[in-house]
Image: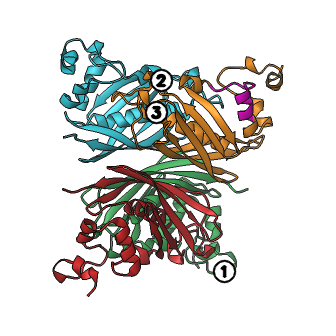
Chain colours: A orange, B cyan, C red, D green
Amino acid sequence: MSDTSTLTENGKSHTPGALPKAAFATMSGLDIFERMMAGDLPAPPIMSHSNIRMKEFSEGRAVFTGLPAREFLNPLGTVHGGWISTLIDTALSCAVHTTLQPGEYYTTTTLNVNMVRPLLETSGEVICEGRIVHRGSRLATSEGDLRDANGKLIAHGTVSCMILKPS
Amino acid sequence: MSDTSTLTENGKSHTPGALPKAAFATMSGLDIFERMMAGDLPAPPIMSHSNIRMKEFSEGRAVFTGLPAREFLNPLGTVHGGWISTLIDTALSCAVHTTLQPGEYYTTTTLNVNMVRPLLETSGEVICEGRIVHRGSRLATSEGDLRDANGKLIAHGTVSCMILKPS
Amino acid sequence: MSDTSTLTENGKSHTPGALPKAAFATMSGLDIFERMMAGDLPAPPIMSHSNIRMKEFSEGRAVFTGLPAREFLNPLGTVHGGWISTLIDTALSCAVHTTLQPGEYYTTTTLNVNMVRPLLETSGEVICEGRIVHRGSRLATSEGDLRDANGKLIAHGTVSCMILKPS
Amino acid sequence: MSDTSTLTENGKSHTPGALPKAAFATMSGLDIFERMMAGDLPAPPIMSHSNIRMKEFSEGRAVFTGLPAREFLNPLGTVHGGWISTLIDTALSCAVHTTLQPGEYYTTTTLNVNMVRPLLETSGEVICEGRIVHRGSRLATSEGDLRDANGKLIAHGTVSCMILKPS
C-alpha cells in the first residue's frame, strides 16, 4: 500500500509529523494546505505543540493564528522570541509553499525577525500573515507580520527560501 | 513579604514563567543563571516545553542543549525552523544577559537565523552556543550556532539587543 | 542670507558632508529633507558619490532614485551588492528619519538586504522606497524595496534603528 | 603574452568591471584572487570607487582594507552604512568565492549587517575579514567583521549565497 493511497483513502493513518512523500510530488502547495484545512492531510505536530492554527491560504499568502500560553514564557515573563519566530517562520515559509507546483520542494535558508513590542501571556490570540515578495525559479522571499487582536504590531520579518526540483 | 525574600527563602513558590522582578534589580545576569542552574530560581517554561536545557554560562557566553522530538516537526518531516530559532534566540539572547549588571534589563530586537542543514527527529541532542560580539551601553549583539552531537553545523545566527536601565 | 547660515555656528560654513549640528536639534526630520531638496541644506556626499538622488519624502516614507554606473560593478560584471545596500540603507533609514521631532536623533543598528535579481550597468535608473513599519520611543523599523524602471524587484530589506534623545 | 589575453575571447579586451567569463569557467576562486592581486586580472571597479583594497585570501577567508573618505559621509557626518555594507558584502561574499571550483558560480542572496559603532572620516584605515561558516553544494554562508586600526569593532554581519553550476 503506497503513501498515495493513504492520501486518497484514509488520510489519517500516516506517520504523524510528516506529509506523505507523494504529497509534494503530486500536489501543489495550495492543494496541500486545502487538504490540511479539510483534515485530509495531517497538520504538522509543531502546530498543536505551539498553539498555532491555519486560518487562510491563497497563492503567495498564508495566515495563521496563535494563542500565547504560560508554556511559552521566557525568564522576563513575556512570550519567548522563539514562539514569535515560530509563527513568523511558519507564515512566511508557507507563503512560499503556496506557490509550489507539484514536484517542487523548498527549504527556508534565512529567517530575519524584528521584535518591536513585548507579547504577554494575557495578550490573547495573535494573527500572523506571510506574503510572497519574490518568486523566482531557484529563490523565493516573503515578508510578514504578527499582530495582536487589536492590530498592534508585535513583530515582523522576512524569509529567504531555495526552490528545489529533484530530478 | 517581598519578591526578594521569596528569592532567598523559598525560591520555588513564585509565579511560574517569570523571574521575580527583584531578580533583575538586584542580581547580575550571571548570578541569575547560576541560581537557575542550582534550582533556586525557576527555569522559564519555554525550556521544558521545548526540550531545552541549560548547560554552561560565563560572561558573554551561554550554552544550551536541546532534544528534537516529534512535536517539533514541520510538514516536511524535519524539525521546524521555529524550534531551531527558539534555541538560537535563547542562547544568543542569554549570552547578552550574562553581561548584565544588577539593575540592567534588555530586550532582543532583531534575530537573524541561517539554516544550513535539515535537523531530524532522530538527530539526537544538539548543542547551541551564544557568544557576545559587542556590548555597549545601549546596544549589544551576539552570534552563535547550533550543532549536532557530531559537531555538524545545523544553523547559525546573530541577535541584536537593547540594553535598558530603568530609572 | 539663507537659513543655512543660521544653522552654522558663528557663521562658519559647515563641514561638507555633515548637517550642521543645530539641524537635528531644531528641525524635524521632514523639515531637514525639505530643506535638502530645496538646496538650503547640503545633501550628504555619499549621494553624488553613489549617483543617488532624493525624490520624495513624507512622514514615514522616503524615496530615492539611483543610476547604476560602471564604477559600481563587482567582479561578476553586475552591480555590487554594496551599491544596492547603500540605496536600501539610505531609503529605509531616511524613512525613520522623516519621523524624528526636533531634538531627536537616530542610528541604524541592523540592515538586512535580500537580493533577488542581478542589476546591470545597463539597467537604467532604479527607484528605492523606504516605509516605516514601527515607530516606538526607542526603537523604529522600516522596510522597503529597490525596483528598476519597469517595476521589477531587484532587492528588498529591513532596517532597525535606535531613537536617541540626548539630554 | 599574458594569461589574461587567453581569458578574453578572440583577443578582445574585456569590459572593464567584469572578469572575463572564461575566468569563472576555468579558474578556481582562489586562483582568481591571486591573479587579481598580481594584477593579471582586473580588480572590479567598485574597489577603487570605494577605496577598498585586497589584502589576503585563503580558502574560506578573504580580507580587505578600506579607507574612509569625505565622499562616503551621511547627513549625520559619519561614514554611511552603505559603505560599511559594501565592505562587509565584499569580504563575506569573497570568502565564499574563495571556495569555488572552476565551473562554479555564486550569487549573494542575503546580507545582514549589525552596525555597532560610528565610523568617522578621521577613523583611518579599517580592515574587514570574511570567513566561511557553511559550504554546501547549493548553499554557502559566511560571517565577518569590520574593525578600525585599533581592533575596535565597527560592524559585523553574515551573508548567504547560492552556489550555481551552469550545465
x and y percentages locating residue C16 in the rendered image: 29, 78
Would you name the residue on which mark 1 appears?
Answer: D11
Q: Are marks 3 and 2 in contact (CB under 8 Å)?
A: yes
Residue C149 image label: none
- In the rendered view, tell whether residue D165 sits above or below residue B48: below
Would you name the residue on which mark 2 appears?
Answer: B50
Residue type at mark 3?
Gly
Q: Is residue C80 visible?
A: no
Question: How would you rate the neighbour count of disc 2 (Cα within 10 Å): few for under 14, some for 14-19, many for 20 or more?
Answer: many
The Cα atoms of the two marked residues, 3 and 1, are separated by: 57 Å
- Region in magenta: A32-44
- In the rendered view, tell whether residue C78 sits above or below residue C112: below
Residue type at mark 2?
Ser
Task: Give the residue at x 39% y 63%.
Answer: C98
- In the rendered view, tell whether residue D143 sits above or below residue A38: below
x and y percentages locating residue D18 in the rendered image: 58, 72
Task: Give the residue at x 83% y 21%.
Answer: A9
Q: Is residue D152 visible?
A: yes
Pick whichever, D142 or B25, lies toward us: B25
Find numbered disc 3 in the image and state the secondary structure of the residue it sits on.
helix
Residue A82 image label: 3
Question: How would you rate the neighbour count of disc 3 (Cα within 10 Å): few for under 14, some for 14-19, many for 20 or more?
Answer: many
Q: Chain of mark 1?
A: D
- In the rendered view, tell whether residue B122 sits above or below residue D165: above
Q: Chain of mark 3?
A: A
Pick whichever, D41 or C4, lies toward us: C4
Question: How would you rate the neighbour count of disc 1 (Cα within 10 Å): few for under 14, some for 14-19, many for 20 or more?
Answer: few
